[in-house]
Image (spheres, helix red, strand yellow):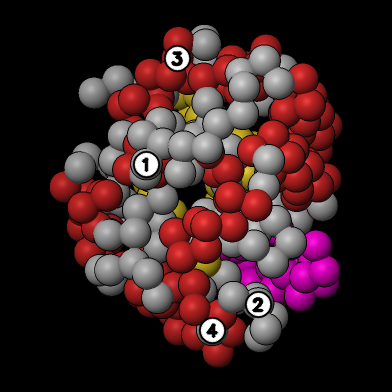
Amino acid sequence: MHTPRCNHATGDVADYANAAIAAGLSEIGMSDHSPMPDDFDKPWRMDRTELPEYLQEVEQVRDIVKDQLDLRVGLEADFHPGTQAYVAEMIASYAWDYVIGSVHYIGDWGFDNPDTIQIWDTWKIEDAYCAYFKLVEQSAQSGMFDIIGHPDLIKKFGHRPPADSVPVNQAIESMLQAVKQADVVLEISSAGLRKPVAEIYPHTRIVQRAAELAIPFSYGSDAHSPNEVGHGMKECLSMLESFSIHEIASFKQRQRTMIAIQHA
Ligand code: ZN
Ligand code: FE
């Protein structure tokens, strides 16, 4: 979940924690958009100089709520070829509980940014999907991340390749094999339900195949405001359970434990 430091979220950390307690959650994690090198899409993330304050704020709230809620601190980092050294150094700079790796860019195109949606017109949808899943595959292979964020974000605005597209289906299979091989976790995210695609990330078929491969999942609301904390959790967990997945991943100091899905 995010904080206003990324310049597109509202509510402070205490508001997210209180919303989680009110929703009956026992554990949440803040993972705001990480800093990136200076020339890289600066408006959508915290500045490197803010990192210590971000940590301090989460740690302060963590101490206040500790009897009611486990508050974990991480980052949502970008996987973007050419920036790996910067990201690796930043990850190593603090004992994060978890680091999410997300692909938001194909080349320098922020494909999920509404401001550049017209660039979709210059792409064949299948090609954009293949390029995207290749990057997700590389993000898993990078070894830098614990969790692959919103694993089919490319569908955000509802652009769809044919369901039987051989190249796209091969790219997805290859990505999932890499995730399995690298032993990283896939995020099931309710954010897609709030976007034009109106669907959980990732698609049912990806969840099904991941389940066959015994790839673990974590759940995320990707909340950008306190009222989104826990949004769509039931739908996400039900989808996992429909494929006989009965536990989700939890991270503390980058150690993964699996916890049983609880029924309210
Ligand atoms: Zn965001
Ligand atoms: Fe993201």
Q: Residue at x 52, y 37 (%)?
A: 159
Which amino acid, mark 1? Pro
Q: Nearer the viewer, residue 142 or 21?
A: 142
Which residues are drawn in magenta? 75-100
Which residue is more in the foreground, 108 or 54? Answer: 108
Camera sees residue 236? yes
User: 205 or 154: which is nearer to us?
Assistant: 154
**Place of residue 140 in the rendered image (x, y in percent of width and height, measured from the top left):** 76, 44
- Answer with mark 3 or mark 1, whichever residue precedes in sequence: 1
Lower sequence index among marks 2 and 4: 2
- Quarter of the view holding residue 199: top left
Number of residues whose C-alpha sits closer than 10 Å to that of mark 4, classed few (under 14), some (14–19) or many (20 or more):
some
User: What amino acid is labelled 4 in the image?
Assistant: Asp
Residue sticking out furthest to the left:
22
User: What residue sits right under mark 2 in the picture?
Assistant: 40
Q: Is residue 102 visible?
A: no
The residue at label 3 has a CB less than 8 Å from ligand 2: no
Instruction: Write down the residue under mark 3.
Output: 241
